[in-house]
Amino acid sequence: MKTTHLLYLHGFRSSPQSAKARRMRDFLAQRHPGVRFWCPQLPPSPQAAMALVAQGIASWPRAAMAVVGSSLGGFYATWVAHQARCPSVLLNPAVHPARDLERYIGEQTAWHHPEERFFFRPEYVQELRVLELHGQAPAGPELAIIAQGDEVLDWREMVARYPAAQLRLLEGGDHALSDFEPHLEPIAQFLRLA
């Protein structure tokens, strides 16, 4: 079955304006114009974010959808793929966001619009814990693209978290996957984009 619907989930403090989200959107428009692409602006509350996503993909064909997620979006993508039983692509995925984001409780600025502020509340840490799927087998095929040069997350934790994933382990690189371009075609092939 070809993928006709693709969900992209951005990371913490990020937005649909992230370089990878825009590059993915442009790549689909050029090479796979029949694929429906959706990259929503996720609210800071994990519970609200997953409710928004669930509502947005409610009518999508489960057998023809896939999800791509970066950083915290990779953590969310794992949860969405488990619920929808669909393939996922994980780009430097957050593995322990409840642990790692605890120090960000309080007022934050949006990465692409620093004038925009939001509050990361203490209860969001528990909301992240509720979404954890550690130790559960994936419900669909997984592709993990992990940079050993990630300056934010530990690549060893990412590799250990996704033992069943098809792995593209990059020497060097960075958390943003600034060299994202060469990965688009392998992602398209893995997801069998229509």
Image (cartoon, rainbow, N blue to C red):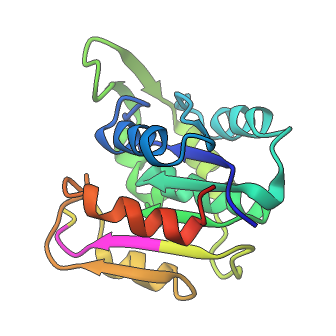
Apparent side of residue 110 relative to residue 192 in the rendered image (left or right): left
Across and down, in percent, residue 86 comes to 72, 64
Which span of residues is magenta-colored? 144-149
Name the residue at 38% across, 70% down. Answer: 145
The quarter in which the N terminus is drawn is: bottom right
Residue nearest the viewer, comparing 19 with 163: 19
Q: Does the magenta-highlighted stretch encompass residue 146?
A: yes
Residue nearest the viewer, comparing 125 with 12: 12
Residue 36 visible in the picture: yes
Apparent side of residue 146 relative to residue 6 in the rendered image (left or right): left
Name the residue at 63% across, 36% down. Answer: 49
Across and down, in percent, residue 103 comes to 35, 46
The image shows residue 108, relative to residue 191, as above or below, that is: above
Taken as a whole, is the magenta stretch helix, strand or loop?
strand
Residue 16 position by quadrant? top left
Name the residue at 30% across, 75% down. Answer: 155
Residue 12 visible in the picture: no
Name the residue at 78% across, 65% down. Answer: 85
Across and down, in percent, residue 51 comes to 74, 36
The image shows residue 116, relative to residue 139, as above or below, that is: above
Q: How many marks?
A: 0
Q: Does the magenta-highlighted stretch encompass residue 5?
A: no
The quarter in which the C terminus is drawn is: bottom right
Apparent side of residue 47 relative to residue 68 in the rendered image (left or right): right
Across and down, in percent, residue 101 comes to 41, 49
